[in-house]
Image: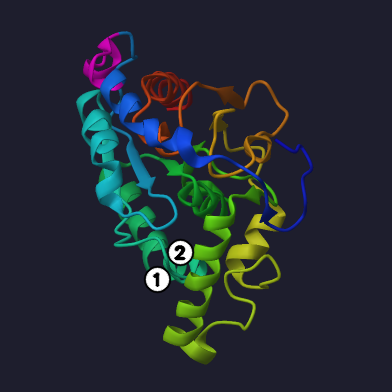
């Protein structure tokens, strides 16, 4: 695997066969004591908004949603039917309202957990509304320009064309690219404020993107686990880390 990183998404030669093992992550989770909350600090009923990855919906995070509720938090689905939409519109017309509602209903700052592209969107939301965020956890999310499997680049281009066709002049011509000047991208470039505790979980066996793009270089933030990119949403080591970090930053 090449280790070259770029400012813009580019292609990397990855074998996606390992991603077919994501079912093993789910099986291992159900066989782990952490699935029932063993060894995980009890939650304080804080709100946790969870965001799905590229071309996925909230259904993909049903297991995580149920687990968060079981260990003592108040999870909120993102409301994303399919993560194939302009991220700026997702934040402006839905997530900001959801964030405000979650904070009002719990009386606490809100934790964000995003898988893959969902983590990228969560980072932008945190940068835009830092006073409402308790912590930010990303699962296999690129923190800067990533090298992606060619199939992901192909799908992303198809989504970009769909967004332009659907919204027309309501979105910039550069929508869904690194060159876009929307509020979503401006927040990405600004970065997450240091006041927000972050956790970036990644796997070196990632078959979707270059795992090195998921690291900050800070060992207090970066957490490596074994498993697949897709399976990070069901990985017992990921859940254990989430439980500990949420308790630490609540």
Q: Is residue 217 left or right of residue 112?
A: right
User: What residue is rendered at 39% in x and 58% in y?
Assistant: 55
- In the image, is residue 57 above or below residue 85? above
Indicate left or right for 7 with 247 as reference: right
Residue 26 included in the magenta stretch of the image? no
Give the magenta part as a residue range. 29-38
Q: 147 and 236: which one is in front?
A: 147
Q: Is residue 62 above or below residue 168?
A: above
Out of 213 and 64, give the one closest to the viewer: 213
Residue 176 — which label?
none
Q: Position of residue 192 (x, y in %)?
A: 63, 46
Residue 99 drawn at (x, y percent): 38, 54
The reply to whether callout 2 and callout 1 are in contact (CB within 8 Å) is yes
Disc 1 secondary structure class = helix
> Residue 60, position in %: x, y?
29, 45
Image quadrant where residue 48 sits: top left
Q: Work out whether residue 135 can be spotted.
A: no
Q: Circle 2 sits in a helix, a strand or a loop, which is it? A: helix
Above/below status of 95 relative to 212: below
Q: Is residue 240 left or right of residue 10?
A: left
Residue drawn at 25 percent across, 23 percent down: 71
Density class for disc 1 (Cα within 10 Å; few <14, some 14-19, many ≥20) is: few
- Looking at the rendering, in which quadrant would you find the C terminus? top left
Q: Observer-nearest residue: 232 or 217?
A: 232
Could you say which is closer to the camera, residue 54 or residue 100? 54
Q: Position of residue 79 (x, y in %)?
A: 29, 58
Label drawn at residue 93: 1
How many C-alpha atoms fall within 10 Å of the one at disc 2: few (<14), some, or many (≥20)?
many
Q: Which residue is mark 2?
A: 91
């Amino acid at each position: 695997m090449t280790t070259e990183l770029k400012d813009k998404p580019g292609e990397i030669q990855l074998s996606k066969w390992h991603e077919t093992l994501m079912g093993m992550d789910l099986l291992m989770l159900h066989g782990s004591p952490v699935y029932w909350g063993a060894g995980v600090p009890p939650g304080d009923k804080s709100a946790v908004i969870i965001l799905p990855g590229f071309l996925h919906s909230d259904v993909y995070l049903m297991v995580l949603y149920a687990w968060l509720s079981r260990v003592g938090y108040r999870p909120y689905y993102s409301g994303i039917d399919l993560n194939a939409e302009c991220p700026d519109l997702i934040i402006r017309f839905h997530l900001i309202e959801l964030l405000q509602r979650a904070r009002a209903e719990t009386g606490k700052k809100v934790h964000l957990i995003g898988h893959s592209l969902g983590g990228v969107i969560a980072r932008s939301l945190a940068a835009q509304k830092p006073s409402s965020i308790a912590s930010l956890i990303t699962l296999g999310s690129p923190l800067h320009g990533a090298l992606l499997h060619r199939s992901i680049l192909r799908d992303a281009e198809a989504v970009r064309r769909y967004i332009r066709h659907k919204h027309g002049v309501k979105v910039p011509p550069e929508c869904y690219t690194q060159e876009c000047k929307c509020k979503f991208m401006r927040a990405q470039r600004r970065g997450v404020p240091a006041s927000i505790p972050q956790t970036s979980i990644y796997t070196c066996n990632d078959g979707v993107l270059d795992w090195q793009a998921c690291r900050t270089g800070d060992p207090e933030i970066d957490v490596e686990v074994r498993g697949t990119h897709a399976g990070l949403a069901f990985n017992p080591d990921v859940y254990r880390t989430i439980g500990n970090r949420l308790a630490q930053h609540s």
